[in-house]
Image (cartoon, rainbow, N blue to C red):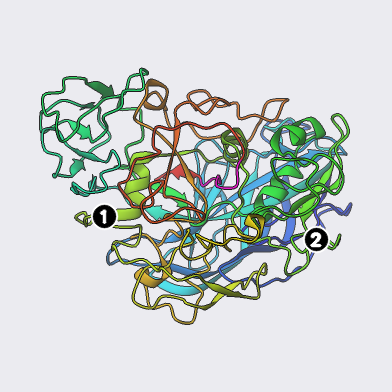
Amino acid sequence: MCFSVTGHLHPKETTIRKVFLLLYMLTLQSAFSNNLSVAHVRLVRRDVSAGSNSPSNFVYVHFNVSWENSWRTSSPPYNWDAAWIFVKYRVGSGSWNHATLDANASHDIAPTGSTISPTTDGKGVLVYRSADGSGTTNFTGIEIRWNYGADGVADTAVASVQVFGIEMVYVPQGSFYVGDGTTTDVEAQFHQGGSVTTPFQITSEGSFTLGGTDPSNMGNNNNQNDNSGAFTMTPDDFDNTTTQTLPASYPKGYNAFYCMKYEVTQDQYASFLNTLDGTQQADRVSAVSQGSYMAKDDAQNAPVNRNGIRCKTAPVGSTPGEYGNDLNNNGVYGESDDGMDIACNFISWADGAAYLDWSGLRPMSELEFEKACRGTLVPFTNEFAWGDTAIARSYYGLSTAGTSTEDVASNYATTMGNASYGFTVFPVQNVPDFNDYGPLRVGIFAGNAGNTGRLTSGASYYGIMELTGNVVERTITVGNTTGRNFTATHGDGVLTSGGDANVGGWPGTDAFGAGRRGGRWSSNVGYDGKRISDRAGANLFAANRDYLYGIRGVRTSPN
């Protein structure tokens, strides 16, 4: 059997590409701000003792993984960050497939100071600190078992592997509140049945009733019924009797889950595209002509709203093309200022769902969104993701724009929450060229020299970044039947021949059942649900690609 590996490091996600050498170890080194990198990948200790081409045959994927600004704490919020690691493989020059990893933790090699948590479906593993600490994490000599025989790979095959890593944050099991009790700027927020000023507490993953006046029910300040099973409850309508059941299968946020620390970056999305065939690529991006950029108009020959993903080689039929970042529009891909770390916009619901399926993650419910923001704290009226109403209101000046160290050089707020939104990154008036503005580098506020903690970094209770602003969070709504039927099934790493997610129980390509939370880079304070409990867009489905849409995924904790 001849396995091969190569190296191509990416911010937040690492791809190991192909060199035809048997069990060859390729030494690579890289350092990025707030970044996860994988290096020194090799395949070791192949076992064929079960017999020639047996489904039980396996080999170990050996690698090092590191990332900055890592932590684990046994005090509030009692959590840690982690790397979600998954592997893709192909035989010869065939298509890329998702590797089946062993589900038995005792079969993996965890370096001192680390824990490896595999998943029962074999789609990946979570790697994180085994003890309290903070700073840069560097785990050397991780080995995870790939059951290649179970994937139908022959012992004599010439196979290539790619290793990917995504930074995640652990959200522990426990009760929490939704809604913040405000009666101003209500935006359809949740509350306790019969009392619009009382937040509703989620105390289990069990089913409960939506609507009505019973205090054990969850109401919402929404006076619009969308004729698809919505429930209503307004300050002037305490007698409303429209009720629905939220099934136990809908993920409510009580159980532990891992949430992506950052929104999907442009480099991550381009790397995803580069594992698809040409037909799938054409369905997942508008840029299918050589030199075109990832915007609504495929003929666009310049970046739009800071999206620098560009078609380097056009796909032809099922033959894949190649994508990369060229934000500075000079025809040279992957330069330091080409925007790889900027949050990826122009992602439709179908695009985002495909990315999550491909990576073995799943969409986040709108209840999980509030848990990820607020944690176990008592709600604060009109709060943003950092737990306060104070928000920066001056236009940022950037330094080293488009690079992995993109930073706020002027007007970084030191007494208020920082966020990428209309008053900080997009001048509300007198805009000379709308296309020059867009989302910022993920994690930008935490990396600033003026950062003093959760407030100024704009972080959630658990340390998740940019849940307010930047690009819209696409969440699964409780406001219609399709959303309520979401069952939290994880992606299986496999897409349809057309490049769509193939997971049953997820909203389809029409996006019905998906909504939006958390606001965006181009809108003002009170618009589009920037506050934690604002649900102005929670039941508004949109299937299109646009400058405001991105994606962030979660994974139910395997422990």
Disc 2 target residue: 329
Q: What element carries label 2?
A: loop
Q: Is any part of residue 151 visible from this angle?
A: yes
Of 405 and 294, the residue lying toward us = 294
Q: Is mark 1 on a helix, strand or loop?
A: loop
Assign the magenta stretch its main secondary structure.
Answer: loop
What's the residue at 40%, 54% (across, down)? 170
Range shown magenta: 546-552
| Mark identifier at residue 228 | none
- Tags 2 and 1 in contact by the CB under 8 Å rule? no
Report the side of 186 relative to 337 (left or right): left
The answer to whether residue 272 is above or below residue 70 is above
Report the side of 320 relative to 61 (left or right): right
* Location of residue 21 by image quarter: bottom right
What's the residue at 25%, 48% (across, down)? 174
Question: Tag 2: residue type?
Answer: Asn
Q: Is any part of residue 115 visible from this angle?
A: no
Question: Tag 1: residue type?
Answer: Asn
Report the side of 247 relative to 316 (left or right): left
Of 419 and 432, the residue lying toward us = 432
The answer to whether residue 114 is above or below residue 212 is below
* Location of residue 5 by image quarter: bottom right
Residue 152 image point, x, y percent: 74, 30
Label 1 crowd (10 A; few <14 / some 14-19 / many >=20): many
**Sequence order check: which comes first, mark 2 or mark 1?**
2
Q: Total number of numbered labels? A: 2
Q: Is residue 17 magenta?
A: no
What's the residue at 82%, 60% (across, down)? 333
Of 288 and 44, the residue lying toward us = 288
Residue 535 image point, x, y percent: 34, 41
Disc 1 target residue: 382
Distance from Cα at disc 2 to Cα at disc 1? 41 Å
